[in-house]
Amino acid sequence: MNIKTAIFTIACLSAFAAGGWFSVRTLPSPPPAKMSAALNVSKSAVLSAPQMSLPPFEIVDGESVVQLSGDVQRAAQVKVVPLKGLEDKATIDAAASVIDLQPLFDLRSRLTVARDALEGAGAAAQTSREQFDRTKVLFAQKAISQREFQLSEAAMKADRETLEAATASHQGLVQNATLHYGPVIADALTAVSSDIIQNLLAGTITLYVVSLPGDHAPAAPAHIKIKVPGWTYLDASLLSPSPRADPVVQGQPYFYIAKASIPVGIQAIAKVPVSDKAMFGVLVPDRSIVWYAGLPWVYVKTDPEHFTRRLVADAKSAAGGGTFAAGKLRPGDMVVVSGAQLLLSQELKPRDITQQCPDPPECDG
């Protein structure tokens, strides 16, 4: 019984296998033209897959040029403004610091007290001298006693000594003021009324000490510009030489005053003219400058889709804000004020890097 069942099972399996082989052999194969077309379609799909490439970049006459389409410029909010011409004078930078006025005011108070004491002692000495002269005449005429004469003489001598002491005290303070601040400020401190001192007390002007380079010291300019952090440039006028140099900054110190109230201890930069000869250039907005290799650059829009990176040559801070520059930059050049950093980053990216797949995870596997 078992043997018959096994023989029947083997016969069935053989029949099924023979039928499957026959059906495969008799199916029609696809034409060669259709197979070629399918391969071409697959190849075209791969070649036409979106690629992510960098904006075109090239070197033209030694300058870097980046190309951005109008659509990309609008999407990146790239904005440009024209450069304005600027006439400036050659200047050098010098250290400037705001003077602490408290010691100066304390010295003025002491000078005021000493001056009042001197005036009082002078008046007393004058009175006692006149009294002694009258007493001397009366004593010669035997009109007064010798004791009265001696008392008058002693009073005169005492007042004279008081006057001499008051004079020495006042002169010592004046010398102290001269040694610390120079004769101009010393005279203002000793005067009964001084516009400079009153304005300093009111806070309407600020006193600076500016350390000029040694080769510039013999001819300190009457007017300079001072750049204070957080402020625009301030006009400052020469007051006098300073008898005390800054131990940190080398140079010949001068006192300058400017009409502004600046906190004590602020370290500023003075723009000191070194020549009356005018320099012609352009005023570059600070927001248009990008730094690369330690140098300032701007991107100039040379046509609707091309931006050229140019050096901000002979750059220095302009008195009214911004940067004065010369070199290849000209008035009317359209410089990028928004998007310059984007252009630089695109320019510095490695070239010839493409990606066949728009979404990297899709390329996995």
Image (cartoon, rainbow, N blue to C red):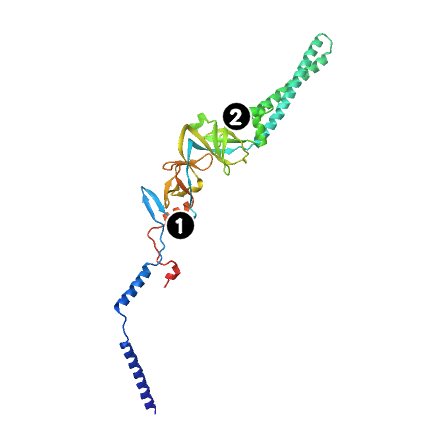
- Give the CA separation, mark 2 to mark 1: 66 Å
Residue 187: x, y in percent? 56, 23
Badge number at residue 219: none
Type of amino acid under label 2: Gly
Residue 286 in view here: yes
Residue 9: x, y in percent? 33, 86
Nearest-to-viewer mark from 2 and 1: 1
Q: Residues within 10 Å of mark 1 (few under 14, many from 20)?
A: few
Residue under label 1: 71
Q: Nearer the viewer, residue 135 or 293?
A: 293
Judge whether 283 appears above or below 46 on screen: above
Q: Secondary structure at mark 2?
A: helix
Find the residue positioned furthest to the bottom: 1
Q: Are marks 2 and 1 in contact (CB under 8 Å)?
A: no
Judge whether 25 appears above or below 127 on screen: below
Which image quarter holds the C terminus?
bottom left
Q: Nearer the viewer, residue 115 or 235?
A: 235
Dot 2 or dot 1: first in sequence order is 1
Type of amino acid under label 1: Asp
Q: Is residue 43 left or right of residue 165?
A: left
Task: Name the image quarter holding residue 289.
Answer: top left
**Residue at 72 percent of width and 12 percent of height:** 146
Task: Name the image quarter holding residue 17.
Answer: bottom left
